[in-house]
């Protein structure tokens, strides 16, 4: 398996650029199924999840072409295809976002129940209830959702779940409602910037949407959506990760090309932890000459601290003086990184729905394993702060959501080498496994 070998203790310095948002690009790419003309997307990040979704669309009859400057061209060629490839959909949850566009534009969809990172229970019942409210006939068959409708019809839809609004559910329902007959009013909608970006893309194609960025979204259905061009917003999670990396290494760096207005809660928390933040225009200058202070962190829906930044902040808190409690109200089970951080010497105690951190003077390098995308990012940041060498295994998780994270950090002065780790077992045993295994698990 691929791994990062990190030599810690090197303060980061310099300037690094933020890529386009993975979490915005995925539902936007899925929504191109709705378009009756060619679509050009700019600043699309070159990450594994986007490549996987591009393959899903290609098998659904969408022509997909990408160039080297982050530009993607998509055009529907064969609208008869409605069955999403199970092997691809089960790699990541966001591919489930093709369900709404398929049933709205092609009148039928067969989409396997999704896979993705193991960060807790993430049911799709709100997706299905929302599409059913629009008039789709929903059935479950052989592990797939089968949805059919001659034409969807606008309706009032409430999307509140037990842990708050559903982001991907809002994306699915909003995309589908653009071609429904009449008016759809979504209440308890997610307000994340990535959803606003999806809405702006749909408006570019000709959709009529009001209330983006608020809990109430009103959509007046249209008969047809055309083509158009759209530029994906900067990735606020990547920007936060890079800023925290500079702080964890006790360095000084500038994160350029960020959407600062989307990061208020994270930047305020870093300031509380003693990190000097100067945010102007699209640049975030980070300076942390001293150890950061440990603080309490509560991850919650936007505009709060994102659940996708909670593990990275815990890695930072682990090397600061004081005590802090971490709670995740979006995914209460998202604390698999705790065990791995403790291998590096972090002092973290489990509490209901989170962890209590007591900062230590220094972490010590050790072999650790990424269990999901953001947990992997937290381990990389901890490795930058640790003394000695840290080996982060299963970095395929990181490649799903970060565009060449190791290269960006190395440009700031980090020492990260991409290497291959041979699993336990003799060469003969590994060869036997390779020839006898019919399927490959994709992380």
Image (cartoon, rainbow, N blue to C red):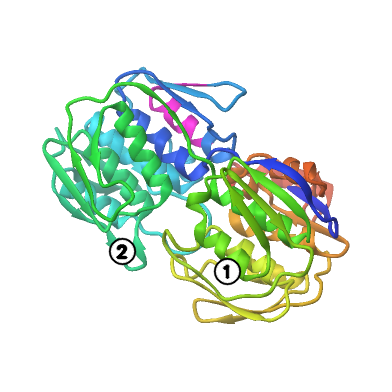
Mark 2, other Cα within 10 Å: few <14 / some 14–19 / many ≥20:
few
- Residue ID at (37%, 39%): 198
Report whether 183 appears left or right of 174: left
Q: Which mark is residue 118?
A: none
Mark 1 and mark 2 lie on one chain; the one further toward the N terminus is 2
Label 2 element class: strand
Q: Residue at x 16, y 49 (%)?
A: 133
Relative horizontal placement of residue 319, taking residue 116 as reference (left or right): right
> Circle 1 sits in a helix, a strand or a loop, which is it?
loop
Position in image of residue 252 (x %, y %): 76, 54
User: Does the magenta run of residues contain 248?
Assistant: no
- Corner quadrant of residue 162: bottom left
Give the percent coordinates (x, y) of residue 396. 65, 46
15 left or right of 374 in image:
right
Q: Nearer the viewer, residue 423 or 127?
A: 127
Hey, which residue is sitting farthest right in the picture?
Answer: 388
For the residue pair 255 and 35, the one nearer the viewer reads as 255
Real-space Cα separation, disc 1 to disc 2, in angstroms:
21 Å
Q: Position of residue 391 (x, y in %)?
A: 80, 56
Q: Quadrant of residue 49?
A: top right
Task: Count the labels in the image.
Answer: 2
Q: Residue at left 43%, top 35%?
A: 85
For label 1, the residue is 335
* Relative to 324, residue 422 above or below: above
Query: Are the residues at dot 1 and dot 2 in contact (C-beta closer than 8 Å)?
Result: no
Residue at image position (53%, 59%) is 118
Q: Position of residue 299 (x, y in %)?
A: 49, 67
Q: Which residue matches tag 2?
A: 161
Q: For label 1, count other residues whose C-alpha is less than 10 Å away and answer few (under 14), some (14-19) or many (20+).
A: many
63 falls in the magenta region: yes
What is the span of residues highlighted in magenta in the rendered image?
A: 52-65
């Amino acid at each position: 398996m691929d791994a990062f070998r990190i030599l810690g203790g090197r303060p980061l310095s310099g300037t690094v650029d933020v890529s386009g948002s993975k979490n915005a690009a995925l539902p936007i790419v899925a929504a191109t199924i709705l378009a009756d003309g060619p679509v050009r997307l700019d600043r699309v990040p070159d990450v594994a999840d986007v490549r996987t979704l591009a393959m899903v669309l290609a098998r659904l009859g969408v022509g997909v072409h990408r160039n080297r400057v982050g530009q993607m061209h998509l055009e529907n060629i064969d609208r008869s295809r409605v069955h999403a490839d199970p092997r691809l959909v089960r790699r990541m949850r966001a591919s489930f976002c093709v369900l709404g566009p398929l049933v709205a534009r092609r009148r039928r969809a067969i989409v396997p129940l999704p896979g993705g990172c193991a960060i807790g229970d993430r049911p799709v019942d709100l997706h299905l209830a929302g599409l059913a409210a629009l008039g789709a006939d929903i059935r479950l068959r052989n592990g797939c959702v089968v949805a059919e409708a001659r034409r969807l019809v606008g309706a009032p839809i409430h999307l509140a779940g037990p842990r708050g609004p559903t982001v991907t559910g809002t994306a699915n329902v909003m995309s589908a409602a653009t071609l429904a007959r009449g008016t759809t009013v979504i209440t308890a909608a997610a307000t994340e910037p990535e959803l606003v970006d999806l809405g702006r893309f749909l408006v570019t194609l000709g959709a009529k949407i009001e209330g983006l960025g608020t809990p109430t979204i009103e959509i007046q259905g249209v008969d047809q959506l055309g083509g158009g061009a759209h530029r994906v917003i900067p990735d606020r999670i990547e920007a936060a990760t890079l800023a925290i990396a500079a702080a964890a290494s006790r360095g000084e760096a500038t994160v350029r090309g960020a959407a600062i207005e989307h990061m208020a809660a994270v930047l305020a928390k870093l300031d509380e932890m003693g990190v000097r933040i100067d945010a102007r225009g699209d640049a975030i200058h980070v300076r942390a000459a001293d150890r950061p202070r440990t603080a309490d962190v509560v991850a919650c829906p936007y505009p709060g601290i994102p659940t996708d930044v909670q593990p990275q902040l815990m890695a930072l808190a682990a090397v600061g003086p004081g005590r802090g409690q971490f709670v995740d109200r979006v995914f209460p089970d998202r604390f698999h990184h705790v065990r791995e951080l403790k291998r590096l010497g972090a002092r973290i105690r489990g509490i209901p729905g989170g962890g209590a951190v007591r900062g230590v003077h220094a972490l010590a390098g050790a072999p650790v394993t990424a269990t999901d995308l953001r947990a992997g990012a937290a381990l990389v940041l901890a490795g930058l702060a640790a003394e000695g060498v840290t080996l982060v295994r299963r970095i395929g998780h990181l490649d799903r959501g970060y565009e060449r994270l190791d290269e960006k950090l190395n440009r700031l002065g980090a020492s990260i080498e991409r290497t291959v780790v041979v699993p336990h077992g003799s060469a003969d045993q590994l060869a036997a496994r390779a020839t006898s295994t019919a399927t490959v698990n994709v992380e």
